[in-house]
Amino acid sequence: MRLGWQQLTTGFFCRPIRRLPPCRRNWTRFRGRGVPWLFGLRGFHTAGITGPCLTQEGVEMDDPGPTLLLTRPEAQSTSFLADCERRLGRRIPTVISPVIDIIPVAEPPDLNEFATIVAASGNAVRQLGDILEGRIVLTVGEATATLARGFGARAKALGETAESFLEHVEEIGFPAIVCRGRHARCNLADRLSAQGVTTSDLVLYDQAPRPLSRAAHALLAGSLPVVAPVFSPRSAELLSRQAAAAPLIVLAISKAARAAWRGDAEFRVARHPTAESMCDLVVEAL
């Protein structure tokens, strides 16, 4: 038996759905994929809004407020969004559209010849994975150290930035190897070698540019405010290339990320270069 749209929506979702007039049957995106309005189903985040939007209960909101645009890789964006929503105690209208793809470009060497592994980022830890078990890993950032411990490493963060990491050279056993991405503001291996620490440099992955989704383009072309956290100079520079008519509030994780932005926007810089401080900025902006 073939079912009509109204029968499907009222029967399958087990509740009546009020039909919207044509001018307000907008499209939204969920994590970069196109889906029609789903009338407040849990798990979907609204974006590309040109008129009143719906809450999770299907009630219209006269002022949807700013929309969050997250451009980190999807898993990291999803985790960050969950933290922000816990802090706010509500769902946040969001578009997830990564501006980079993490592409492996090298296999890790035999790490047994190194006394210390330096992980410059969480993505470096993810690329190394289980081979970190039982090894001494020094990281830039406590979040990266926590991630490395999840793979069984004996990990310690020497600083939240590359510069603060370099203030603790005496804690690094050598020979050491720095594992990082292709695009890095500070070449830790060169800086460590200059300070007398025998160090190899290994580029494990590339941060290749990725086009924004249609939903993200629609959001930036709209008239509602957009809150855009940027977690690195690379992502700031890539996002700032995009044309934007919407009022932009750029939340930068560091002064370096702020400096990498090209163009006009309202800027706020995190107190500390951590996801927690970035979450603070999101809460303040929303």
Image (tube, rainbow, N blue to C red):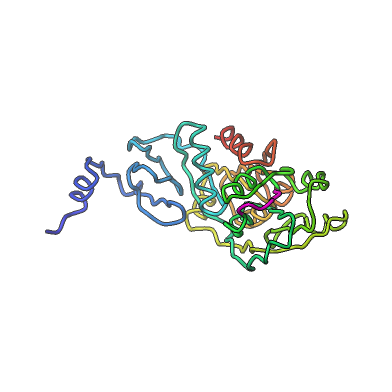
Q: Which residues are magenta?
A: 133-139
Q: Position of residue 5 (x, y in %)?
A: 21, 53
Decide: is 240 above or below 208: above
Picture quadrant of residue 105:
bottom right
* Residue furthest to the left: 1
Q: Nearer the viewer, residue 231 or 150?
A: 150
* Residue 210 as seen in the image, left or right of residue 57: right
* Residue furthest to the bottom: 106
* Residue 84 as seen in the image, left or right of residue 255: left
* Residue 7 as seen in the image, left or right of residue 124: left
Count every numbered label the image shows and give the total: 0
Q: Position of residue 172 (x, y in %)?
A: 78, 50
Q: Residue at x 82, y 55 (%)?
A: 192
Q: Position of residue 177 (x, y in %)?
A: 74, 59
Q: Nearer the viewer, residue 153 or 50?
A: 153
Q: Nearer the viewer, residue 272 or 205?
A: 205
Q: Is residue 134 magenta?
A: yes
Screen quadrant of the N terminus: bottom left
Q: Position of residue 188 (x, y in %)?
A: 78, 55
Screen quadrant of the C terminus: top right
Q: Residue at x 14, y 59 (%)?
A: 2
Q: Is residue 272 magenta?
A: no
Q: Nearer the viewer, residue 56 or 249?
A: 56
Q: Residue at x 58, y 43 (%)?
A: 247
